[in-house]
Amino acid sequence: MDERAERLEILIDDAVRVRHPGEALRGGWRYNSEEPLEVKRAEVRVFWFTEGKGDCDSGVHGSQASVEDGTLDAGRAFPFEVALPDEPWTYDGRLVKIRWAVRVNVTPRQGQEFAADASFQLRPKGWAPKPQADGQAEAR
Protein backbone atom coordinates (compact mmCIF):
# COMPACT_ATOMS: atom_id res chain seq x y z
CA MET A 1 0.00 0.00 0.00
CA ASP A 2 1.19 3.51 -0.81
CA GLU A 3 2.56 5.29 2.28
CA ARG A 4 0.31 8.28 1.51
CA ALA A 5 -2.79 6.04 1.41
CA GLU A 6 -2.00 4.96 4.97
CA ARG A 7 -2.34 8.63 6.00
CA LEU A 8 -5.94 8.82 4.78
CA GLU A 9 -8.45 8.44 7.61
CA ILE A 10 -12.10 7.80 6.73
CA LEU A 11 -14.76 8.15 9.42
CA ILE A 12 -18.36 6.98 9.02
CA ASP A 13 -20.89 8.60 11.38
CA ASP A 14 -22.14 5.29 12.74
CA ALA A 15 -19.92 3.03 14.81
CA VAL A 16 -22.06 0.02 13.87
CA ARG A 17 -21.62 0.77 10.16
CA VAL A 18 -24.95 -0.76 9.19
CA ARG A 19 -27.03 1.48 6.95
CA HIS A 20 -30.44 1.01 5.32
CA PRO A 21 -31.71 1.79 1.80
CA GLY A 22 -32.64 5.45 1.36
CA GLU A 23 -30.64 6.60 4.39
CA ALA A 24 -27.82 9.08 4.14
CA LEU A 25 -24.30 7.80 4.66
CA ARG A 26 -22.49 10.61 6.46
CA GLY A 27 -18.88 10.89 7.43
CA GLY A 28 -15.66 12.65 6.71
CA TRP A 29 -12.05 12.08 5.86
CA ARG A 30 -8.68 13.71 6.40
CA TYR A 31 -5.09 13.41 5.29
CA ASN A 32 -2.90 12.93 8.38
CA SER A 33 0.45 14.43 7.50
CA GLU A 34 2.49 17.33 8.78
CA GLU A 35 3.36 18.24 5.20
CA PRO A 36 0.58 19.70 3.04
CA LEU A 37 -0.10 17.89 -0.24
CA GLU A 38 -0.93 19.73 -3.46
CA VAL A 39 -3.63 17.84 -5.35
CA LYS A 40 -5.40 18.00 -8.69
CA ARG A 41 -8.42 16.26 -7.18
CA ALA A 42 -9.64 14.38 -4.11
CA GLU A 43 -12.91 12.51 -4.45
CA VAL A 44 -15.19 10.37 -2.29
CA ARG A 45 -16.85 7.37 -3.94
CA VAL A 46 -19.48 5.06 -2.49
CA PHE A 47 -19.44 1.71 -4.25
CA TRP A 48 -20.28 -1.99 -4.01
CA PHE A 49 -18.27 -4.96 -5.20
CA THR A 50 -18.47 -8.74 -5.22
CA GLU A 51 -16.03 -11.31 -3.89
CA GLY A 52 -15.97 -15.06 -4.33
CA LYS A 53 -16.26 -17.56 -7.12
CA GLY A 54 -16.90 -16.47 -10.66
CA ASP A 55 -16.52 -13.06 -12.22
CA CYS A 56 -16.18 -10.09 -9.89
CA ASP A 57 -18.54 -7.18 -10.38
CA SER A 58 -18.73 -3.66 -8.97
CA GLY A 59 -20.64 -0.44 -9.29
CA VAL A 60 -20.15 3.15 -8.15
CA HIS A 61 -23.29 4.47 -6.51
CA GLY A 62 -22.20 8.05 -5.96
CA SER A 63 -19.20 10.31 -5.91
CA GLN A 64 -18.41 13.84 -4.91
CA ALA A 65 -15.32 15.98 -5.25
CA SER A 66 -13.84 17.16 -1.96
CA VAL A 67 -10.96 19.15 -3.45
CA GLU A 68 -10.30 20.47 -6.96
CA ASP A 69 -6.85 21.97 -7.57
CA GLY A 70 -6.09 22.57 -3.93
CA THR A 71 -4.14 21.54 -0.87
CA LEU A 72 -4.67 18.84 1.70
CA ASP A 73 -3.58 20.49 4.93
CA ALA A 74 -2.63 18.54 8.03
CA GLY A 75 -5.73 17.30 9.84
CA ARG A 76 -8.27 19.31 7.81
CA ALA A 77 -11.56 17.37 7.69
CA PHE A 78 -13.62 16.96 4.52
CA PRO A 79 -17.24 15.92 5.20
CA PHE A 80 -19.34 13.80 2.85
CA GLU A 81 -22.98 12.74 2.61
CA VAL A 82 -24.46 10.31 0.09
CA ALA A 83 -28.04 8.96 -0.08
CA LEU A 84 -27.89 5.17 -0.30
CA PRO A 85 -29.73 3.16 -2.96
CA ASP A 86 -32.34 0.43 -2.46
CA GLU A 87 -29.92 -2.32 -3.51
CA PRO A 88 -27.79 -4.38 -3.81
CA TRP A 89 -27.78 -5.33 -0.14
CA THR A 90 -24.71 -6.61 1.62
CA TYR A 91 -24.68 -10.37 1.23
CA ASP A 92 -22.46 -12.98 2.89
CA GLY A 93 -23.00 -16.11 0.83
CA ARG A 94 -20.75 -19.13 0.63
CA LEU A 95 -19.94 -18.62 -3.05
CA VAL A 96 -20.50 -14.90 -3.50
CA LYS A 97 -20.33 -11.90 -1.19
CA ILE A 98 -21.53 -8.35 -1.87
CA ARG A 99 -19.62 -5.64 -0.03
CA TRP A 100 -20.02 -1.84 0.26
CA ALA A 101 -17.29 0.74 0.88
CA VAL A 102 -16.42 4.40 0.86
CA ARG A 103 -13.25 5.18 -1.08
CA VAL A 104 -11.24 8.39 -0.93
CA ASN A 105 -9.30 8.72 -4.15
CA VAL A 106 -6.53 11.36 -4.31
CA THR A 107 -4.78 12.55 -7.47
CA PRO A 108 -1.71 14.56 -6.40
CA ARG A 109 -0.08 17.17 -8.64
CA GLN A 110 3.06 15.02 -8.55
CA GLY A 111 3.24 11.26 -8.22
CA GLN A 112 0.77 8.41 -8.47
CA GLU A 113 -2.89 8.45 -7.54
CA PHE A 114 -3.67 6.74 -4.21
CA ALA A 115 -6.77 5.68 -2.29
CA ALA A 116 -8.10 4.23 0.96
CA ASP A 117 -11.38 2.42 1.74
CA ALA A 118 -13.71 2.06 4.72
CA SER A 119 -16.38 -0.63 4.63
CA PHE A 120 -19.99 -0.53 5.76
CA GLN A 121 -23.07 -2.70 5.31
CA LEU A 122 -26.26 -1.91 3.38
CA ARG A 123 -29.01 -4.03 4.96
CA PRO A 124 -32.81 -3.96 4.60
CA LYS A 125 -34.76 -2.36 7.45
CA GLY A 126 -35.58 -4.94 10.07
CA TRP A 127 -32.53 -7.05 9.26
CA ALA A 128 -30.97 -8.87 12.20
CA PRO A 129 -28.02 -11.28 12.31
CA LYS A 130 -29.04 -14.93 11.97
CA PRO A 131 -28.70 -16.73 15.34
CA GLN A 132 -26.41 -19.74 15.43
CA ALA A 133 -27.07 -23.04 17.20
CA ASP A 134 -25.10 -21.88 20.29
CA GLY A 135 -27.37 -18.85 20.69
CA GLN A 136 -24.72 -16.36 19.57
CA ALA A 137 -25.43 -13.99 16.70
CA GLU A 138 -23.63 -14.75 13.47
CA ALA A 139 -20.63 -12.46 12.95
CA ARG A 140 -20.97 -10.36 9.82
Image (cartoon, helix red, strand yellow):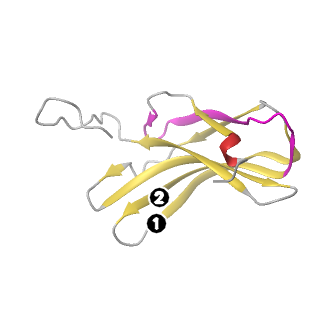
Q: Residue at x 27, y 34 (%)?
A: 128
Most foreground residue, 114 or 81 = 114
What's the CA distance linking mark 1 and mark 2?
A: 6 Å
Q: Residues within 10 Å of mark 1 (few under 14, many from 20)?
A: few
Most foreground residue, 22 or 49 = 49
Locate residue 101 relative to residue 91 in the image: left or right.
Answer: right
In the image, residue 34 lies in the stretch drawn in magenta: yes
Q: Which residues are magenta?
A: 17-39
Q: Which amino acid is tagged 1?
A: Asp
- The label shown at residue 57 is 1
Locate residue 98 relative to residue 119 in the image: left or right.
Answer: left
Most foreground residue, 26 or 12 = 12
Q: Would residue 21 be seen by someone viewing this image from the given angle?
A: no
Residue 89 at x, y = what percent? 38, 49
Most foreground residue, 75 or 44 = 75
Q: Residue at x 28, y 55 (%)?
A: 93
Residue 113 at x, y = what percent? 74, 58
Q: Earlier in the sequence, mark 1 or mark 2?
A: 2
Locate residue 46 relative to residue 92 in the image: left or right.
Answer: right
Q: Which amino acid is tagged 2?
A: Phe
Asked whether the beta carbons under mark 1 and mark 2 sit within 8 Å of each other, the answer is: yes
- Asked if 125 appears above or below 41 in the picture, the reply is above
Q: Residue at x 70, y 54 (%)?
A: 114
Q: Residue at x 44, y 68 (%)?
A: 56
Return the residue at label 2: 49
